[in-house]
Amino acid sequence: LQIYIHYDLHDGAEVCAKLSSASANRKDGGCPNDCTEEHDDEPDEFSYTCNFEHLPPLILTCLLPKSYPSKDPPYFNVTVKWMDGHNVSQLCEMLDTIWAELPGQEVVYQWVEWIRSSSLSHLMFDGKITLGSDCPTHKGDNRAISRSLSLESVIPSMLNYSSKKHYEAFLENLHTCRICLNQSKGSNFVRLPCQHLFCVKCMETLCRMHVKEGTVFHLVCPETKCNASIPPYLLKRLLREEEFERWDRLALEKALDSMSDVVYCPKCAIGCLEDEDNNAQCPKCSFIFCSFCKDPRHPGKQCITAEQKLQRKQASGRMTEWEMVKEMLSIKKLYRDAILCPKCKVPISRTEGCNKIVRQLWSVPVLPLWQGHNWI
């Protein structure tokens, strides 16, 4: 039978891996991210110290002979692929000692309990585990199967195992959502990069609300005084496919609107870069236009006013008098909804904030217009 024995590390364990300069300078070498590098007194030795919450298990393999337990002990071997050979040999010797103290009795259970609770302290591993030479050459007990790979391979493997076990424990433990205050298993929670936890239902509701309202820049951690952004990979998990596509589109639009040199083509509505002369060329239709009035480029000439534009359209028969009135009313409403930007000192929309499009509309003067018997 094979028994996997997991160590209970309530306070964690510190592992110090000692390497020689020859192994530390290998091409594929290097200290893992969770390690700190120290130099020993010996100039050709280095030590990497890592903290672990979980250690890979010890594997006890037993074969019970017909004469067990009355006469012979179990045949066994001990496998610890991260431990040095002489330490694993000491464990084998201790198992022999336990059998000698309990002759004729079933000892497998006692072996397992001793390994689980006392083996690390027996090896003087209380609080700190030291892994020695990078190229183990120990020839000890044949029943001891120890580390055969270099520490540069073993340490990352141990870190991956510890991280995996930590995540499994998180999924099974109960946590409290800071929004709805309900308790649930970690599998029903989302952990943000800032390490704050919220239940999936609350985060889905929050993200969908902001995407629906278009306030995509408010997609940040709900924790008080935390403004960490919710990353795209989490949004993809929390939003439906069409909602995620809308978020992607809105985020791009908001980013472009925040750039002072980006304007939109009046024909294709494609973002274009404005040059120093306030002109831009559409990359799609190649239309070159003035970024202020959106008319074709007119070097050396001033932009025509809104009234002149409307009069031209009316004269050409493309706009009726009533359509002209409605157009002027909409521009007048823009005046009413505008305030001065405290930074730029230019009129801006109360709802949309300071952006170039609103400033361009404001720069066009509006004249009173006769409708029926009144000036508007």
Image (spheres, helix red, strand yellow):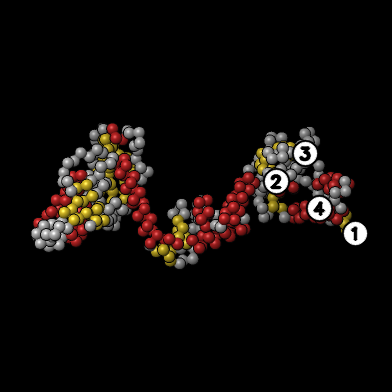
Q: Residue at x 11, y 57 (%)?
A: 72
Report how far apart the C-alphas of labels 4 and 2 lie in the structure: 23 Å
Query: x, y percentage for residue 81?
Result: 26, 47
Q: Is residue 360 above or below residue 239?
A: above
Report how far apart the C-alphas of labels 1 and 3 lie in the structure: 37 Å
Please name the amino acid that badge 4 sits on: Met
Question: According to the image, label 1 marks what residue?
Answer: 373
Quadrant of the image for the N terminus? bottom left
Report how far apart the C-alphas of labels 3 and 2 lie in the structure: 15 Å
Q: Is residue 342 above or below residue 275?
A: below
Which callout, 3 or 2, points at the residue further toward the start of the chain?
2
Name the mark nearer the viewer: 3 or 2.
Answer: 2
Q: Is residue 49 left or right of residue 223?
A: left
Report how far apart the C-alphas of labels 4 and 3 lie in the structure: 22 Å
Report how far apart the C-alphas of labels 1 and 4 lie in the structure: 17 Å
Name the mark nearer the viewer: 1 or 2.
Answer: 2
- Looking at the image, do the residues carrying marks 4 and 3 touch, with CB atoms under 8 Å apart? no
Question: According to the image, label 3 marks what residue?
Answer: 296
Query: x, y percentage for residue 152?
Result: 31, 40
Circle 3: is it few (<14), some (14-19), or many (20+) Cα within 10 Å?
A: some
Question: According to the image, label 4 marks what residue?
Answer: 328
Which callout, 4 or 3, points at the residue further toward the start of the chain?
3
